[in-house]
Image (tube, rainbow, N blue to C red):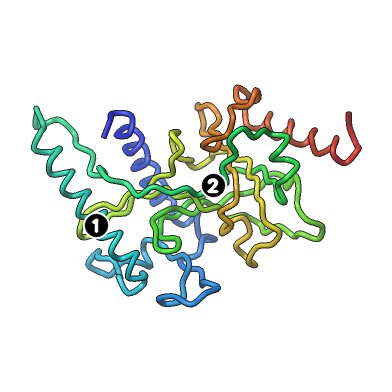
């Protein structure tokens, strides 16, 4: 693992610690969400706490057999790589990240060659908001996190759409400790993960969502976010727009202007 990856994993650990320290703030994030299709225990999402036994082991009965196999291989590979890297330490003070092997997620609708105009035209929902909480867990048997987003503005939505007080957004980012080691998951985006207070622009490409889980489940989404003191993070594969150097709040203004033009309200 190169130093860039190690730095990102350390930052991810700090994010996870911050989220854990602010657990009560995430009271709106459910510990489990029932699946539309039958599965073990009938669950689509369950939190890290829900997935653990009292001894810290994972409740494997919650997972499909093929997910169990993949997660167990990841744990074994990670521990083996961690022991190998530890054996190479040149100093007892050298830190070795316990997260050496990660399960990757493609959790967005990537738009190579796309543009802000294309996103505005094709998205069914566009939300401008801020991260107020997060919770680690498993979505469809794979590790990730749900972020609770307080929306500043719903810029676009189908007629009659009534937004919840806060939206829930899933991203494939997690660092989950178990009795067998660390389970890590990362999206393929190279930037630091969202932190509490991060500002987001969410573009969704679905006609309908499960009640209470709006913006959570559809994989067809594009997320722009900006942590404090950092530049804006854009979806992987998205052609770097000329707006990239702007603050995300300014991007929201640009999106609003595109929508005005589309509605014939602006020039």
Decide if residue 209 is on the left or right side of residue 157: left
Out of 165 and 10, give the one closest to the viewer: 10
Image coordinates for residue 214, horizontal then vertical, percent? 63, 59
Which mark, residue 73?
A: 1
Image coordinates for residue 179, horizontal then vertical, percent? 21, 60
Out of 214 and 37, give the one closest to the viewer: 37
Question: Which residue is painted at 32% across and 34% down in the image?
Answer: 5
Element under disc 1: helix
Decide if residue 197 is on the left or right side of residue 137: right
Classify 80 as above or below 36. Answer: above
Q: How far separated are the C-alphas under marks 2 and 1?
A: 25 Å
Of callouts 2 and 1, which one flags the residue occurring earlier in the amino acid sequence?
1
Name the residue beneath numbered marker 2: 108
Is the C terminus in the top left, top right, bottom left or bottom right quadrant? Answer: top right
Question: Which residue is painted at 44% across and 55% down in the image?
Answer: 135
Q: Which residue lies furthest to the front in this view?
A: 113
Decide if residue 123 is on the left or right side of residue 150: right
Query: Quarter-wise, where is residue 68 in the image?
Result: bottom left
Out of 29 and 138, give the one closest to the viewer: 138
């Amino acid at each position: 693992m190169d130093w860039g990856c190690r730095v990102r994993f350390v930052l991810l650990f700090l994010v996870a610690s911050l989220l854990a320290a602010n657990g009560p703030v995430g009271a709106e994030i459910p510990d489990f969400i029932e699946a539309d299709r039958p599965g073990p225990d009938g669950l689509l999402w369950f939190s890290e706490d829900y997935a653990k036994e009292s001894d810290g082991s994972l409740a494997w009965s919650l997972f499909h057999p093929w997910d169990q196999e993949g997660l167990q291989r990841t744990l074994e590979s990670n521990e083996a790589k961690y022991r190998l890297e530890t054996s190479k330490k040149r100093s007892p003070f050298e830190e070795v990240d316990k997260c050496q092997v990660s399960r990757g997620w493609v959790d967005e609708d990537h738009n190579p060659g796309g543009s802000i105009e294309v996103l505005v035209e094709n998205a069914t929902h566009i939300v401008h908001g801020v991260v107020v909480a997060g919770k680690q867990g498993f979505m469809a048997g794979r590790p990730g996190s749900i972020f609770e987003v307080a929306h500043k503005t719903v810029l676009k939505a189908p007629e009659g759409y009534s937004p919840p007080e806060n939206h829930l957004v899933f991203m494939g980012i997690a660092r989950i400790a178990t009795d067998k080691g660390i389970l890590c998951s990362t999206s393929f985006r190279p930037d630091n993960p969202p932190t509490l207070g991060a500002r987001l622009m969410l573009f969704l490409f679905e006609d309908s969502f499960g009640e209470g889980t709006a913006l959570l489940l559809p994989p067809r989404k594009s997320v722009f976010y900006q942590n404090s003191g950092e530049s804006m993070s854009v979806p992987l594969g998205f052609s770097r727009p000329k707006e990239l150097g702007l603050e995300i709040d300014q991007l929201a203004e640009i999106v609003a202007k595109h929508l005005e033009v589309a509605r014939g309200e602006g020039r």
